[in-house]
Image (cartoon, rainbow, N blue to C red):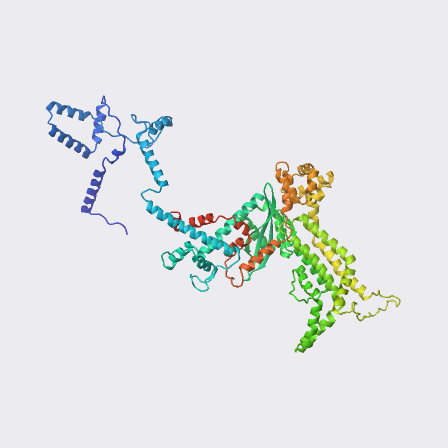
Amino acid sequence: MPPKQLFGAQKHKKRKRDDALKKSQAGAMHKFIRKPPIEEPTEEPIEEQEHVEKQPVEKQEHVNEQKHAEAELEEPDEGEHVKTNINEEHVKPNLVDIFDPKRSGLPKGTLDGEGYSDWHYAHGSLKKHEASLDHLTNMNKWFDMRKRLKLNETIDKVQYEQFKKERDYWVQVLLRIVTLVKFLAKNNLAFRGKKKLYQKGNGNFLGLIEMLEEFDPVIKEHVRRIINDEVHVHYLGYNIQNELIFMIAEEIKKEIIKQIKEAKYYSIILDCTTDSSHLEQMTIIVRYLKLSSNSVTVEKSFLGFLNVNDSTGKGLFEITVEELKSLGLELDDMRGQGYDNGANMKGKHQGVQTSFLNENPRAFYTPCGCHSLNLTLCDMATSYNVKSWSLKTLSQTRWESLVDSVKAIKLQLAAVREALLELGEKDGDRATADEATTIAENEFGFDFLVSIVIWYEVLNTVNIVSKRLQSKDMHLEIAIKEIKRLIEVFKDFKENGFLKAINEAKKLAIEMGIDPIFAQKRVIKRKKQSDESSSSQEASFTREEDFRVNYFLYITDQAIASLETRFDQFKNYEKLFGFLFPHNLRGIDDEDLKLSCNFLENALKFEGRSDIDGEELYMELSSLDTLYTMEFKSPVEVLKHLNETQENFPNARIAYRILLSIPVTVASAERSFSKLKLLKSYLRTTMSQERLNGLAMIAIESEILDNINCEEVIKQFVVKNARRASRIIG
């Protein structure tokens, strides 16, 4: 509402109040103005009269009254009285124009006064101030205050001791809570059940608090305060748990990002799976090198799970690029990408690897070596329609793991056959008894025994290579050697393996009481065509020769062809980086070395910029002492030697860093899925994505977790909230 209009009486009262306020504040600035020295008046009486008129009325009346009182007490004569009046007329008032920068008669400035406008005179005033009585007095007071602060003898000693005791108490409580969070997350344990202490089924977190309460005096006091309602903030709720989990995970992620940026070059490993709540989760693993003056380590770090709604190649590419940008990782520094053999990943037109290569042609794509081995075995099995019955559960994707199923049958063939015959005789169910007898008498023939021996040898050989490829420090040189060796093993097995399999199968047949001969099958005669001569005869094989040609040679040829096709990318890597392998570097001639260096320079060039200079790389590798190269067994040892003399081999160091950054398998991504199944089980399907990522980061990167400073986490936790800061920091 608008203010009311004032009437005559109200206006008069308001005017009187304003006049009284002005009168009371008259001359209030005089105490802040330094008085200039009084000078004897010489000329310009008009200006003096003007200054006299500016003096406030109250002050002039007060001066007159004071002088009148002094006159009455002293009773001076008329001459003195006249002289006093004359002096009063010529006294200059103690007023200074504070807006006049050129006023004279004032000192150049003081440390505790108006300051300095001319610093030329500051040093003199500073020396004068240091020797002044005020400075010495205040310094003595400060020394005394500092001494009493150290001895806790200040006036608020009791209050400060009480606050310090309460602060230390809360710090110790938070330290124990953070330690419990780290322990539960590191061991993949669930946190909470019901929300109250000493209530049945309240979960692992509160259960550990109850356990510590019996032994730890800090937690005992904390629980006592909670039970007696002495505190309303106890930091045991699920929101605090989530906040601490997120903070610890962020500290781990910061350390990982720091190491990746120090390494510069990195590769990504992606894989997808479905969690217990039927959401598609994609894991991001980064492979990089951790370099120091005396060590070179290949690291594979987990960066998180991403909830994927679009599983196409374009969708996976966009969400991956967005995540890398949010983490501060440059796409231009990516030198490798490793995925499984899914169409959305390895597609040549719309796959993820194609999208990354369009953005950065130096991000070399490597299909997972273990997946390629599994697909090789799948090609062998499906090509001959291998029967799929076993004592153990079969896997349709991890065929090399079927060695355990085959091993269980191979080592217990006699016992299995006896059990089936006994089941056929004693089982009350006629259908079950007939099926068991049929399997024992018909399936356990000599050809079955030979097949078991062959497949056990194949699966065992592939499984050994697969386990080696999954090692943490695996790199291209070892992977190429392993695949070449596997192909040679299959070629040798093709030539000599059949006779060995026959001999071993005969031993098993004798133990089981089975005739060691191949069962004869009914010959199916083909109807001859009208234009076919009667003299033409089909090639006839014995049963053993027929098994060798149509079964053994068929699956071994399929294995060799599949290995050479599926690991074709490894051949390209050998052409590109093969000259950097120590065993090749020792025997290569200068011309081939120079061509290889220039070829690598072109492969690492994008938009007119290359990571290395081919000519300089050639000179650096040529200058390596032959004695040193004889001692090197792997590219890791070569890079370690080059890293000790960083200034001499810059291009060679970059080439070896890129070589060792390229992934071979996606085994680390599969391991993160194992943690995912432990964390987000069917009992914890409502877990949020943020909490899942935090728990997974702590559980997977437990080595970095051990180096996290709990006090720093507590400091960040406290500063995040003003009420916590007032309680703990003060």
Locate residue 146: give its quadrant: top left
Question: Is 116 on the left-hand or right-hand side of 271?
Answer: left
Q: Nearer the viewer, residue 485 or 603?
A: 485
Q: Position of residue 142 (x, y in %)?
A: 34, 36
Does residue 361 appear in the picture of this structure?
no
Q: Quadrant of residue 68?
A: top left
The outermost residue toward the top is: 42
Q: Out of 156 and 656, give the one closest to the viewer.
A: 156
Q: Looking at the image, can residue 484 be seen?
A: yes
Residue 444 position within the rendered picture, expressed as x and y whole percent measured from the top left: 73, 69
Q: Is 391 left or right of 67, judged from the image as shown?
A: right
588 up-or-down from 717: above or below: above
Q: Pinpoint residue 715: horizontal percent, then vertical percent.
A: 44, 48
Q: Nearer the viewer, residue 330 or 700?
A: 700
Query: Horizontally, is 308 left or right of 382 in the view?
Result: left
* Up/down of 19 relative to 111, above or below: below
Q: To which quarter of the image does residue 532 belong?
A: bottom right
Residue 347, percent from left and from top: 65, 54
**Which residue is nearer to you in this view: 552 or 360?**
552
Residue situated furthest right in the rendering: 535
Name the side, left or right, on which 695 lies relative to 66: right
Up/down of 280 relative to 56, above or below:
below
